[in-house]
Amino acid sequence: MLRLEVRPQPSKLWGYASPLLALAITVLIGIALFEVLGKDPVRGLQVFFWEPVKNTYAISELLVKATPLLIIALGLAVCFRSNVWNIGAEGQYIIGAVFAGGVALLADKNTGVWIVPAVILAGMLGGMLWAGITALLRDRFNANEILVSLMLVYVAVQVLNYLVYGPWKDPGGYNFPQTRTFERVAQMPRLMDGSRVNIGLVFALLGVAGVWLFLFRTVSGYAQTVGGLAPMAARYAGFSSRKALWVALLTSGGAAGLAGAFEVAGPIGQLTPYVPAGYGFAAIIVAFVGRLHPVGIVFSAVLMSMFYIGGELAQSRLGLPKSITGVFQGLLLFSLLACDTLIAYRLRWKKG
């Protein structure tokens, strides 16, 4: 029979191969799921893995979805490597969108291009402020950051709803709960005509390089990593655990808020109750599938955005429910957790 046997040391090979095996398992389970639902598995896989990349426009839409996932996941990678478990990036994303939207609403036809940097900065500050609440409660009262950050997501949703149903509601919007559409000058500049891809993609790619340099080429990044892997050793080396906590949460919060700014002043163009898109939660999966490494996160963000687009197409073309996106995301996460067992253990065949 097959048994798990502890490896003498963790396998580097399976550290890289585990996400690939998890993806293969997800695809196989997906095929079985399509069969059970009475759908053509080939058509189902085509919708998820071919339609999002079949032409230039499809790829541009893929990048639109991947941008917020990449930005948020980069911030979460810093957090998780520091052993700080920020599960509330969705709330920080929402508050970042609210702050950015509030600045964007100040613009009129005479406003200059300075409004774009102001919108971006406001989004970052909003996300950092919301993450700072978690950092403060963890630092001063030793509150569990998982519970605090997660509960703050629901508070953020209520803040957004209050504004779009109340003081920021568009008086000319036929009573729909939304703000007025932002002036063109306050919206994110697009990178090319005929595409919704905006400068957020440039910031995301710069973020990949920046996080890589921070984590692997600076003393501060080294302190964050050591603090996460070996807190006692970090204290012995003179690294501040309090500083690591604040750096981790403010970095991830600022990244989530930045993503919210690019989203609300980019593809959405106004504040609505539908700003919460689950990107903050999906980015957790993106970060772990990418092995908490900036380069790996790029590929996992693209993969997760394929699931988002594939789920939307599956609704319209295959008649599947909206929840199919979450099903594939969950399958990928659980498959990864299972496959990661092979990093520390190996399978052995033993008789009896």
Image: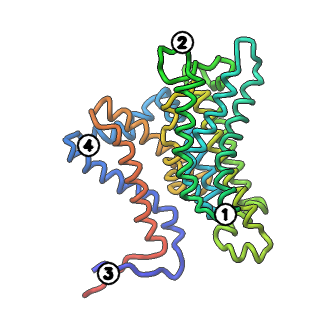
Who is closer to the viewer here, 177 or 50?
A: 177
Q: Earlier in the sequence, mark 1 or mark 2?
A: 1
Q: Quadrant of the N terminus?
A: bottom left
Q: Residues within 10 Å of mark 1 (few under 14, many from 20)?
A: few
- Residue topped by disc 3: 349
Height in image: 161 above or below 326? above
Distance of label 3 from label 4 (alpha carbons): 34 Å
Height in image: 190 above or below 149? above
Q: Earlier in the sequence, mark 4 or mark 2?
A: 4
Distance of label 2 from label 3 (alpha carbons): 70 Å
Residue depicted at 49% across the width and 52% down the height: 285
Distance of label 1 from label 2 (alpha carbons): 46 Å
Q: Position of residue 81 (x, y in %)?
A: 63, 62
Mark 1 vs mark 3, foreground winner is 1
- Residue topped by disc 1: 141
Who is closer to the viewer here, 336 or 267?
A: 267
- Residue topped by disc 4: 41
Residue type, mark 3 in image: Trp
Mark 2 vs mark 3, foreground winner is 2
